[in-house]
Amino acid sequence: MIDISGHVNAGFEPVADAFEENFAIRGEVGAEFCAYVGGECVVNIWAGMATPDRPWAQDTLVFLFSVTKGATALVAQILADRGLLDVNAPVAAYWREFATQGKDRALVRHILSHTLGLPSFPEYWDLVCGDDAAGWHRTDEIAARLAAAPLAWEPGTKLGYHSISYGWLVGELVRRIDGRTLGTFFADEVAHQLGLDLWIGLPVSQHGRVARLLRDPDPAAELLRVIWAPENPAGAALFVGPERRSPVDLANDPDLWTAEAPAINGVGDARSVARMYAMLAGGGAIEGVRIVSEASVIAHSAEQARGTDAVFGNPSRVALGYGRSTPGGMSLGPNDEAFGMQGIGGALGYADPVAEVGFGYAMNQTYMEPGTDRRPRALSTALYEAITRQGG
């Protein structure tokens, strides 16, 4: 038995049972789960250990990896909804220096849909890579290198996950249009408005609340680092360094927490992820606070591309910055209209506008398995079974 804290609405007790089973049979160490249904928080529970000597608490934060991309997509969506960003415009209309090496033909839509063809740039490791957190603060230099880089394919002709560069590309557009960094924009326009404990660029004052990520105990998972070498397309897209440092080790470095790498370095809790997506599942508003229009939710969650990923080789399906469920890949519940993003190691967040679900799961024990981790899958199954029993 694990001591579970938080609250569970009547009828959703089986979700807590699945959460407990994650600890008993699925290798959970410390985690939080939150779900909104119809704009109401029906489950918010946490348990286990955040660090070897600190229990998971209500205010524990955790590094979210690519769950961050959903927050970044929302920033772009807000700018588009306000008429400040045209997703069909050339990137160079906002970022003049980008119009080199054939990138004058690149559209904002191509960045958001991972069809741009710029998952990395030449010899990135001399500026920023997974071996050292210090380089991740050099955003002006990174933007300049991306602007000067050649394309790997003609924009719009292939789908390939821009695992790291996606965040810097969107972030530079935000800075050019608004003047604020993406992390500051998110803090002002989303986190503050919705009461979220979710950061892209974590203040030092909050560092004592962060859980420590644990490596996958399966030795085979660590062998992936050998495959993801800098000279391989996947390794380059992941900005793997010559030393092939584990992404989990990098994510535990406080120097990375304070940077703004809007594809991967969000730090927050499951409640905030679920609440953000509950707002989107509710058509752009929650509890009287509107962040985006209902029309923009429909437009930005619509499928833009699908197929075999040109970088990683897995089945993929994307909207404008958000991911969509794919057979054999990411799973966002039973309804095809759901959209969101998963993080390497297990974290997951999504919106389901059909069931009006906002889903957030975060943990510290990473498992480098393909597709969506078995732990959030179990929670999702229990959640939707509870909704069905209540006639939802």
Image (spheres, rainbow, N blue to C red):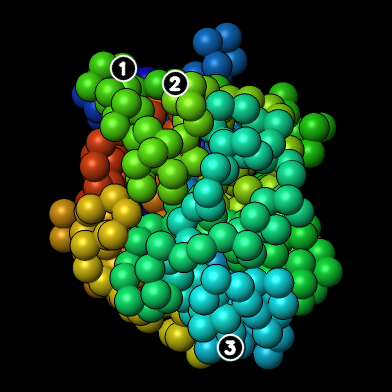
Q: Nearer the viewer, residue 143 or 314?
A: 143
- Of all residues shown, which one is farthest toward the front? 101
Residue 149 point in image, percent of width and height:
56, 60
Q: Residue at x 53, y 52 (%)?
A: 121
Marks 3 and 1 sit apart, C-alpha to C-alpha, by 46 Å
The vertical placement of 245 against 162, above or below, is above
Which residue is located at x 25 percent, y 36 percent?
369
Residue at figure coordinates x 27%, y 59% from the top left: 309
Mark 2, residue position: 214
**Taking the image as drawn, is residue 295 in sight?**
yes
Please report whichever mark, 2 or 3, sits nearer to the chain's N-terminal start.
3
| Type of amino acid under label 3 | Ala
- The amino acid type of the residue labelled 2 equals Leu
Mark 1 in CB contact with mark 2 (< 8 angstroms): yes
Q: Give the label on residue 89, or none.
A: 3
Tell me the element at label 2: loop
Which residue type does callout 1 highlight? Pro
Q: Position of residue 314 (x, y in %)?
A: 22, 53
Asked if the residue under mark 1 is in contact with the one under mark 3, i.e. CB atoms within 8 Å, the reply is: no
Q: Nearer the viewer, residue 57 or 181?
A: 181
Which one is nearer the viewer's eye here, 100 or 30?
A: 100
Q: Disc 1 versus disc 2: distance between alpha carbons?
A: 8 Å
Q: Earlier in the sequence, mark 3 or mark 1?
A: 3
Find the distance from the CA under tag 2 to the CA under tag 3: 42 Å
Q: Residue furthest left?
A: 328
Q: Is residue 51 left or right of residue 377?
A: right
Residue 217 is marked as 1
Quarter where residue 104 is shown: bottom right
Q: Secondary structure at mark 3?
A: loop
Tell me, yes or no, whether the two marked residues, 2 and 3, touch with CB atoms within 8 Å. no
